Amino acid sequence: MLIGIDVGGTFTDGVLFHEGKVVSSDKRLTDQHNLKISLLQVLDKLLETAGKEPIERIVLSTTLVTNLLATGNIERTALILIPGYGLPPDTFKICRDTYYLSGGIDFRGRVIEDLDRAQIESTLKQIHELGIRRLAVAGKFANRNGVHEKTIEQVANELYPDIQVSLSSKISGKLNYPRRAATTYYTAAVAKEWNQFTKAIKEAIKERGIKTDIHILKADGGTMPLDMSLIRPCETVFSGPAASTMGAVALTMDESNSVVIDIGGTTTDISLIVGGVPLYASRGACLEGKLTHINAFAVKSIPLGGDSMLSWQEQQLRIGPERRGSAACFGGMVPTVIDAFNVHYRLQIGDFNLSTNKLAELADRTPLTQEEITSQAVDMVYEQLAVTIRNMFKEWENEPAYKVWEVINRRKYALDRIIGVGAAAHTIIPGLAERMQLDYLVHEYSPVANALGAAAVRPTLSVELHIDTQKQTAMVDPGGISLPIKNAHRYQLTDAKSLALEYLKEFGEENDLEPQDLEPEFYTEEQFNVIRGWDTVGKLFEIGVQIKPGFIKSFKGVRI
């Protein structure tokens, strides 16, 4: 049996899945002050249904990192940059506590300027005196040689062991210095809270006597073991939209072009499926306006949900963005989007009279009738969603996968349907689809599609390898591992690919990935000759291999 749990901004959903069927599901309000409690309440309900049946795997999707960044509730974090030569150092500034050190590494990993020990100690002293206990270190081309970053870490550990240090060379092996620095900064910023969360989950699972793999859903729609998430917790940002997107694919399992709209209580997440495959953000996830090396779907979140409150401000009707509890029909104190749809379409959701009463109270404070309020609210919701989708298509058109689809299919991309998931999908999607003149699908399990998506997806892992045969060295990511290469002068592209595969399998075994999950796919295969004078004196290889996101072998779709 498989368990998937999605901790959303408003609801926590869970499913117990076995042999193509949803055996049990559960939906509860999320306690944003204690995500662990929300998660465990749903888990206990599913375990009760499972009885003594063994649980094969538990996959969790959580908004913890997203919430920390969105609310700014992260501990003050410093960033030390070693920008080397080129652009002015301020070009790479990410946060207010950004410090710059001398020193340099070139693109082949050679030290071209040594660090200044006195400068390191002075900078660390400033950071410590400010009360900062989290530190990110990022050097230009540290992914080619992390010696400078490691030196700073060693000095920090010697002088100030209470400072927690994150190194970019261990976080990402990709080029693009600003993105690697941003990824490292956000990793350092959320590491402590994430470590506490994972520790609490492990203890809770142990208390329940469960002996099974626990995975976390990543922003790219794949999973990683809970222990592995300790290295790069920021990979879990946007795991909610990833869960809804994979849930939509799980419910359809076809090659249609679809827009996925996940309407929760607080926000709506929108993503695109191109030929049955989710569209990725080719430049990586964007956090607080900064691009990162976090692989993620191309998603858009807007502050509009079923529980978004209706109010009268500045002589006009407003929707949200704040949420003040549940819809009136479910006992809430203010009229919401769901209440407007409930009354406008006579849907009889919850207590219909409570929706009517709260909307009547709002109408009494405005020059509008109750009918005019509900009609305007419904129109505003449809218009905001339609405009957001149209604007997103302008952004999506620049994504490589989008363009490739049009070239292969020799026609312009066109939507086949809207897939609605989330608690409010049944209420809102039919009318939106009618207005946009599209087909739609709101499945029986759409309300818990996020949890289903989490339960069914497989682990993902990638290895990036940089080989310099003249230096007889290789750099392996993840981990920033540097190792010597034997018979480097004989190295060919096939040898480099074989080495990358070896590390992919090794990392997979270390993280408890099953052999059947290891279906490697090469996404980068590059070879460059190093020329000195008229002679070739070496080669550079860039190899990228991954276990791409998808579903576990046993998942063939959902049977009703």
Image (spheres, rainbow, N blue to C red):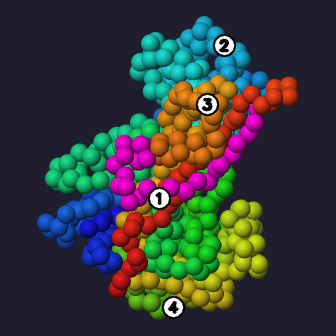
Query: Cβ–Cβ below 8 Å for labels 2 and 1?
Result: no
* Segment tinted magenta in the rendering: 505-530
Closest to the camera, between mark 3 and mark 1, is 3
Query: In the displayed image of the protein, which residue is found farthest to the top?
Result: 118
Q: Earlier in the sequence, mark 4 or mark 2?
A: 2
Which residue is depicted at the point 46% across and 12% down? 159
Where on the picture, by quarter, is residue 208? bottom left
| Disc 4 target residue | 345
Q: Residue 542: percent from the left, percent from the top?
A: 65, 42
Give the amino acid at mark 3.
Ala
Q: Earlier in the sequence, mark 4 or mark 1?
A: 4
| Disc 2 target residue | 114
Q: Earlier in the sequence, mark 4 or mark 3?
A: 4
Which residue is depicted at the point 29% across and 76% down? 19
Local crowd size for mark 4, using a 10 Å CA cut-off: few (<14), some (14–19), many (≥20): few
Q: Is residue 3 left or right of residue 495?
A: left
Give the amino acid at mark 2.
Asp
Local crowd size for mark 1, using a 10 Å CA cut-off: few (<14), some (14–19), many (≥20): few
| Disc 1 target residue | 519
Q: Residue 298: percent from the left, percent from the top?
A: 62, 61
Measure the C-alpha gap from mark 4 to mark 2.
71 Å
Closest to the camera, between mark 3 and mark 2, is 3
Kindly state the secondary structure of the residue where label 1 is placed: loop
